[in-house]
Image (cartoon, rainbow, N blue to C red):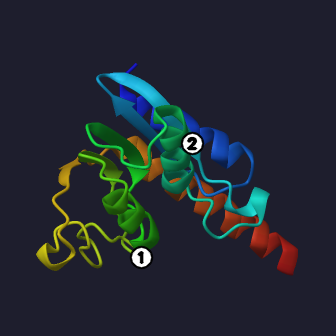
Amino acid sequence: MNFLDIAKEEARIAMSKGEVPIGAVIVKDDIVISKAHNLKETLKDATAHAEILAIRKAAKFLGDWRLKGTEMYVTLEPCSMCASAIIQSRISKLHIGTFNKDMGACGSVINLIDDRQLESFLNVNWLYDEECSNLLMKFFSLKRKINKNKLL
């Protein structure tokens, strides 16, 4: 199993809880040091995105907020909050499963990660993984059906 597969498994866990299916994994020296999925609805916390939760766990595991030498695998392009947290935590490389056409902050809508004024030097690897896209499409399709049935 590769690291993106672990992130996708986290996304599936999120979906099973009624959360937007996004998963994140942080790796150091080819060892998973944290993994997380969205818990925004569960925790009633706007900051409980997969990336933020994974960063918190990794910082606790390493005993430092600086996550130098780590890589993050995430199923969906991070939003501006998460991209900023990734930059602040000094993650070295970001692997993105699919783009976020609504809130993407790594190039799709805005690009925080390649902004020299922010002194962000994050190496990004776009994976364009079809399953990451399909998980999101399936989730929102089901959500629309449920909402439509509530109106009837």
- Of residue 118 and residue 143, the one placed in the foreground of this image is 118
146 lies left or right of 15: right
Q: Which mark is residue 36?
A: 2
Element assignment for label 2: strand
| Residue at (31% x, 50% y) in the render | 96
**Residue 135 in view in this figure:** no
Q: Amino acid at mark 1?
A: Asp
Name the quadrant containing residue 88: bottom left
Query: In this figure, which residue is indicated by the disc labeled 1?
Result: 102
Is 9 situated above or below 88? above
How far across and how far down the image is residue 126, in percent? 22, 50
Q: Which mark is residue 112?
A: none
- Of residue 74 and residue 30, the one placed in the foreground of this image is 30
63 lies left or right of 112: right
| Residue at (65% x, 46% y) in the render | 14
Element assignment for label 1: loop
34 lies left or right of 141: left
**Disc 1 to disc 2, C-alpha distance:** 22 Å
